[in-house]
Amino acid sequence: MKEREEHRTLDLDGQARERLILWIRRRMEEFGITLDDLEAALAVDAATPKYRDAFGHEWDGRGERPDWLTRAVNAGQDIEHFRV
């Protein structure tokens, strides 16, 4: 019985995924967005820093948290304060 429920859930997830893909494709056509446009936007987004302080330190959110941000958080500052 449990396997049947899990299989049904997977089927519904697959259907939701297919509907979402169809919706995205239609919006792309509607707005003239190409796969190259998406790739370029993702590349720009990846290069954009996610966190910045008043001294110009930046961090893209990848890898270990830098010392300047760790010190600020340890001092009680909310990390969201630095989000770009």
Image (cartoon, rainbow, N blue to C red):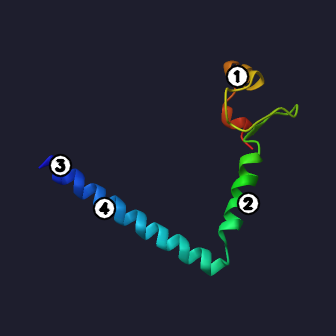
Determine the secondary structure under disc 3.
helix
Determine the secondary structure under disc 2.
helix
Locate residue 48, reporting x and y percent.
Answer: 77, 47
Nearest to N terminus: mark 3 or mark 1: 3
**In the image, what residue type sits under mark 2?**
Ala
Residue 13 horizontal side relative to residue 83, left or right:
left
Taking depth in this image into account, of 69 and 25 the one nearest to the observer is 25
Q: Which residue is mark 3?
A: 3
- Disc assigned to residue 12: 4
Q: CA distance from mark 2 to mark 4?
A: 32 Å
Give the residue at the far bottom of this rendering: 30
Q: Which residue is mark 2?
A: 40
* Residue visible at 67% across and 35% down in the picture: 62
Instruction: Sort mark 3 into few (<14), some (14-19) or many (20+) by Cα contacts within 10 Å.
Output: few
Determine the secondary structure under disc 4.
helix
* Residue visible at 73% across and 39% down in the picture: 60
Nearest to N terminus: mark 2 or mark 4: 4
**In the image, what residue type sits under mark 3?**
Glu
Residue 21 horizontal side relative to residue 5, left or right:
right
Residue 58, located in which quarter of the rendered image? top right
